[in-house]
Amino acid sequence: MSSIFLMRLIFDLTAAGLLLFGFSYWWLGNLAHEVAGTALFLLLIIHNLFNRRWYRTIPNARREPRVLFNTVVTFILMVVMLALIVTSVLISNALSSVMSAYGGFTVMQIHTMAAYWALVIVAIHLGLRWPLLMGLARNALGLHRTNIARTVVLRLIAITIAAHGVWSSFELGLGSKLSMQMTLDWWNFEESVAGFFIHCIAIAGLFMLLSYYTSQGLQWRKRKAGRSIPHF
């Protein structure tokens, strides 16, 4: 693994961690929230600079379901992040004297909705890259041979995370937050801090698994379609 690739991986993982940390507004307050958000957006700029060549490949990319799925997910993520950035500026306390005329309750609702959509889309984005991440983990741990017992254990863990993610979606009222519905069902950080972040990670795990297996399904269908085409 090259040092540049390792640095990119650290930046991306840090950005994902900051996104989760950003949900701690009602726990640590506005200052920590805005500092984390600013750092996150700086890392997003760095991420896009590192991946700028990918944008040039889009016009010539193969029109395959998996490639199209990845492209659509990436552009949806860009839209969500732009919405998060714009609403962040409009409701920022640090810029309140400048932007107070544009902020408001509706903008705060949009900001919250964008944040939860970001959690979901980032998880889908990571799920599409899960084989790469698992390959890096295997190389780092020196696991070069297939092990049936390990595979079974990992799949059981994946099923457990997915089930927990479904439960967590109801516990955090994910559906109402993604649809910007009015709700007073906010997490009580005085009762549990770890519980909230465990729920967020479980939700992310659920969507990572869904996107990974969707991607694998698209690849399987492509291979199946290829075998069914007669060759002359």
Image: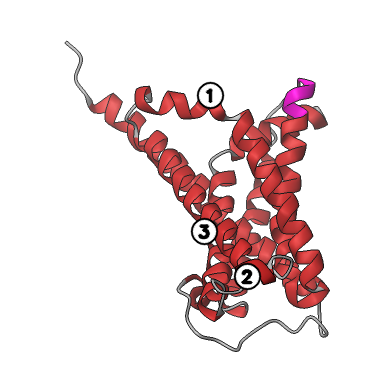
Q: Position of residue 181 (x, y in %)?
A: 47, 81
* Amino acid found under the numbered disc labelled 1: Arg
Tell me where residue 9 sits by quadrant.
top right
Quarter of the image where the N terminus is located: top right
Front tag of 3 and 1:
3
Q: Position of residue 42 (x, y in %)?
A: 70, 45
Dot 1 corresponds to which residue?
Answer: 53
* Amino acid found under the numbered disc labelled 2: Ile
Question: In the image, which disc is placed on residue 171?
Answer: none
- What is the magenta range? 2-6
Asked if residue 129 is among those painted magenta in the image, a careful observer would answer no
Which SS class for mark 2?
helix
Quarter of the image where the C terminus is located: top left
In the rendered image, the residue lying farthest to the front is 98
Q: Please, what is the dominant secondary structure of the magenta stretch? A: helix
Question: In the image, which disc is placed on residue 83?
Answer: 3
Which SS class for mark 3?
helix
Q: How is the image coloured?
A: secondary structure
Of the two numbered discs 2 and 1 on the same chain, state the one appearing first in sequence.
1
Q: Is residue 159 visible?
A: no
Compared to residue 47, the image places residue 199 above or below, namely below
Distance of mark 2 from mark 1, alpha carbons? 33 Å
Dot 2 corresponds to which residue?
Answer: 91
Q: Position of residue 173 (x, y in %)?
A: 56, 78
With 132 as the anchor, is 225 left or right in this view? Answer: left
Distance of mark 3 from mark 1, alpha carbons? 24 Å
